[in-house]
Amino acid sequence: MKNNINMMNKIVCFSFFLLIFFSCKHHENEYHSITDKIEAESKNYQGTSISSEAHIGDLKTIEITEGEHTFLIPERKSQIKSYACTECHTKPLAQMQSKDFKKAHWDIKLDHANENTMNCVTCHNPDNMDHLKSLTGNTIDFNHSYNLCNQCHTKQFEDWKGGAHGKRIGGWAPPRASMTCVNCHNPHKPHFESRWPARFNTQKVKERE
Amino acid sequence: MRRLRVFKSLVKDSLDTITHGSKKYHLWMAFLTFGMLVGMYCYSIQLEHGLSVTGMTDRVSWGLYISNFTFLVGVAAAAVMLVMPTYVLKDIDFKQAVLIGEGLAVSALIMCLAFVVADMGGPSVLWHMIPGIGVFNFPNSMLTWDVLVLNGYLFLNITIPFYILFRHYQGKEAKSRVYIPGALLSVFWAVAIHLVTAFLYQGLQARPFWNNALLGPRFLASAFAAGPALIILVLAIIRNFTEFKIQDKTIKKIAMVVTVAAQINLIMLISELFKEFYAPTHHSESAYYLFFGLHGKDALLPWIWTAIPLNVLATVLLTFHKLRNNFKVLFFCCFILFIAIWIEKGFGLIVPGFIPGPYGKIAEYTPTGIEIGVTLGIWALGAFVFTILAKTAIGIELGKLKYKKNS
Amino acid sequence: MSNNNKKWFSLNLGKKEHVSSSSCSCGKTSGGCGGTSKAHDMTDDEFAEAAIKASIGEERTKDGFEQVFDVKMDRRTAFKKLTASLLIGAGAVSTSCNVISGDESKEKAQIDWEEQFKGNYKLMTDEERQATVDRLVRSYQLRTGKTINMSSKNAEEDVLFGYAFNISKCQGYMDCVNACVEENNQDRNSEMQYIRIHEMKDGKGFNFNEADDNYYHEVPAEGHFYMGTQCFHCDNPPCVEVCPVQATWREDDGLVVVDYDWCVGCRYCMAACPYDGRRFNWSKPEVPEEAINKNQHYLGNRMRKKGVMEKCTFCVQRSRAGKNPACVEACPTGARIFGNLLDPNSTIRWVLENKKVFRLKEDLGTEPKFWYFMD
């Protein structure tokens, strides 16, 4: 009888330790945190076969290098309907403001900063309509219009270069193609309009009654 | 060969016993059968339309089924309170009660498994859980631990009484050498099934209401109160309706177990309430919801405020020897304690775990008719199984069922 | 409309077993057993065809009672079927286990059989993965006559997906939610949505209790900001730990995915998720046929059945092909940034290294790969 109980005790203890042993969770490559893991595993990053080139598709892009970032942005000039501007703007602006001319973009109202800060000629060059101009009067190409914006919006520019501001085109994979300022913001009216949400969930309402 | 013949005769005899009985017995069985049929009908609707026919939603994704499952695991575990003294400590008093207790454990376990299956979204692919042909995520998932311990416990609780009854059926004494190791193992096992079930909830960092260290011990305490309370009630009924003699001393001893467990349970409840309400944090919201309601949502208030007074009243009454020894008071106490713990550990534990949701959203839970139908059906199934087991066991113990060599 | 129950695609494999067991017991794959006819999933034209075919065993797995009194049927369909079955009479029943049943139905039955008893996708070899995908594509073709494109592309080396969300940019338009639902074929009846946008009050911090995630008014609302949540694809996902059958797991590229066909529907993962990232199909998910996104991945937006879990997969069908998830692409404000965490030159890495980022419930140790930041 006593032997039996002794045996039993042994078996119970043994199975208990066996249980403890098996219940240990073994993890390979355990890092202290995800950031450690990212750091360690990206050290010998080889690149992937995935490319977002196919997803960019037929979109015409140009490559820009700003600071340490090199990436693609959509080409702009070919998308402007009546480029080059000088095809119409043959005379200086003052001479064109007469009744004889056909009106083209008379309806544009500037809603960007206040009147003290900006008017049309803050960005447009009245002497050469094919280009934009910086605050100091330097020429800026329409394809690089972000250089115009970053004169004031320096913080957004930094974020945009890094990828924290703005949208990617194509996919996440390299090569990186990002929208430029004017692809999302109308330069004459840069803020986003308020509107109604795209969706409303009626089931959720029922659930929470 | 001989054993097989004995077994055949046992099956035949027990079939004979369970199909014969008084009018009351037949009525009772018919009632249970009806309950099971209703449950099966409700379950067929659930199979057809999916779990959307229940009151569960993405917010409260476990409900009545899992509540009952949790509670019944406790009832099953409580059988050990009778096993331990009888088999291991050789306390003669419990001997008659223990077979009943183990029968109760078996039927409670069958109900547990039925509730789990009823709660599954895809019962037809449950084979995915069978080791070998499926994938069994052991030891990572606590649910696999639970499956293991529940089935193991079911096995123990079937084999031990079966061995004893099988011997008695042949007019022999059961050899203690054979069943004592099993009984000893089942003592550890019973604690394990309930602790593992508690760990099922306790291990979820996502649900602060469950993720506290007291949950496991409280499960045990409440189980050892509710389980034996049910056994007392069952013994009282058996004493009334059959010739099976159960001494007052046995019932009084079990009552003692109930009392101590209920007292410990109450202490733990107070400790829990103190922690939640003296220094409330963001994590106390579930407790607030349970006891006082949150943002005007208070579906659980009637339940929990039924349970708490019943619990306190039963514990206080049981604490006094004089009252406890009065069987009328004792049965009443056992009944209200059983109800109180059923609420507290079923609804009162599972539902608030999900409310408020991870982002503070509240969607309340009310079981639907179909859900209640299935639940009642499973309870009827449990009662049915228990009646069959108890009737056979009592027949053998009373010597009515005996193996005749010639037959 | 008699065809309102046929517009939907419904791959209800779970039901099969019950039906087939009642029809015949031979259980062979070649003899035309073990499958079920999709009587209520057919289009009108197909039904007409089926009625004719019935005499050679098209309707073989459902008995007459089920065919006629199937709850999914409306009166017109029921009447048609009743007429058909009267015409065909007992013929259909007698040929129920017939070997001369059509090749297509035989193939359908075999596919159903193999799909019912296939293994866990996680443990499959690449060939087995391709085989199950081929079966699913073929099955869809047999049922609807339309072709889908399903991929079983595995995780790429040196890729770990991460996501960043700019709280100051989100305007609460919910275009992401819209795109997500359409891309991922989510159940339209229960309006399942993976993404929640919480409208928070300014000056209250990240107080989810007072946030509204189901607003409907012009946005952005005065004095509010918006914060989106979805599955965060934790690197140490509690949902994966608890699954009893390993039906959900973390892929090598960091995506936490579900094998819908392996899931048993216990919803333990749902209870374990601290971020409300998981959704359950409480009833049969239904998507109008014309709205189904046919570019699918086995682990992503393929059709689900009732009683299984599903969740955001960062649009695995898109992201493994190099595209951005639908929500990222749909966002008009550029608040959502997605990329490869292991690529030191990726934009997501720049965000993590240069912005003040934080995650939700970091104290739980789940290591979500979803960061929030502000301008």
Image (cartoon, rainbow, N blue to C red):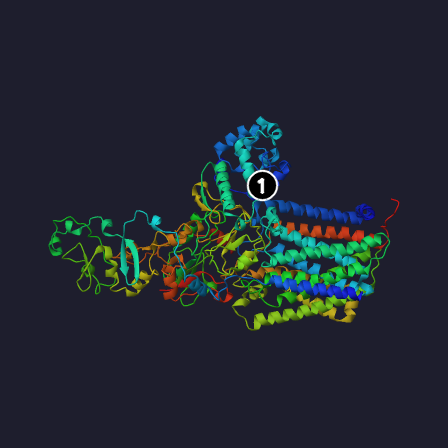
Residue at image x 78%, y 56%? B161
- Furthest-right residue in view? B406
Mark 1 element type: helix
Horizontal side of C321 relative to A112 (left or right) equals right
Location of the C terminus of chain C (image quadrant): bottom left
Q: Position of residue A90 (x, y in %)?
A: 12, 51
Horizontal side of A70 relative to C338 (left or right) equals left
Kind of residue at disc 1:
Lys
Q: Position of residue C320 (x, y in %)?
A: 42, 51
Pointer 1 residue: C16
**Mark 1: few, some, or many residues within 10 Å (few <14, many ≥20)?**
many
- Against B49, is A138 above or below? below
Q: Position of residue B104 (x, y in %)?
A: 74, 56
Look at the image and tell me whether residue C1 can be seen.
no
Chain letter belonging to callout 1: C
- Against C349, is A77 above or below? above
Q: Position of residue B302 (x, y in %)?
A: 61, 61
